[in-house]
Image: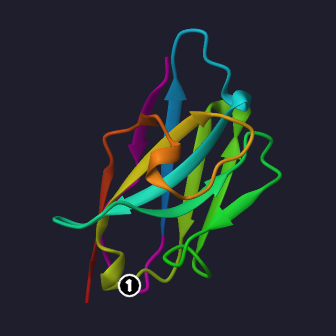
Amino acid sequence: QVQLVESGGGLVQAGDSLRLSCAASGSSFNMDDYTFGWFRQAPGGGREGVSSISASGRSTYYGESGKGRFTISRDDAKNRVYLQMVDLKPEDTERYFCAAVYSSVRGLSRHEYDHWGQGTQVTVSS
């Protein structure tokens, strides 16, 4: 039983930075048992994988949208997962979702995750 809540989105200008946060909680929840991922989705579009981090924190993966400008991290003591985004561009204007699965490692496919937050909107103006 896992609940995920994203925060940190907002309206920014191109070139700005944002740090998204995912707060995890739940009864009998042990954060270090879970792999986490960040996904994003535009209206009418598919949900694509941005980045993931293994339960141990020792392995990270980045999709095409997450390479170069985004960095995933986790702080298990605070039950938090972060996505640091720099040099934001208009094409980053999407809703960003946090996802989790009980596993030591997972990739960037939506079907690999079974817990999802409601998302946080990121809008980048030109």
Where's residue 99, x and y in %? 48, 43
The image shows residue 34 at horizontal and vertical percentages of 66, 34
Q: Residue 55 appears in which quarter of the rendering?
A: top right
Q: Quadrant of the C terminus?
A: bottom left
Residue 42 sits above or below residue 54 on the image: below
Placement of 105 over or under 67, stated as above or below: above
Task: Give the residue drawn at x 51%, y 16%.
Answer: 26
Bounds of the magenta segment: 1-17
Label 1, residues with CA under 10 Å away: few <14, some 14-19, many ≥20: some
- Residue holding disc 1: 89
Left or right: 46 with respect to 17?
left
Q: Position of residue 119 (x, y in %)?
A: 33, 47
Q: Is residue 20 left or right of residue 74?
A: left
Residue at 58% across / 52% down in the picture?
Answer: 82
Residue at 62% across, 31% down: 79
Secondary structure beneath disc 1?
A: loop
Q: Does the magenta segment cover residue 89?
A: no
Front one among 42 and 79: 42
For residue 6: magenta?
yes
Point out residue 100 in the picture as x, y percentages from the top left corner.
54, 38
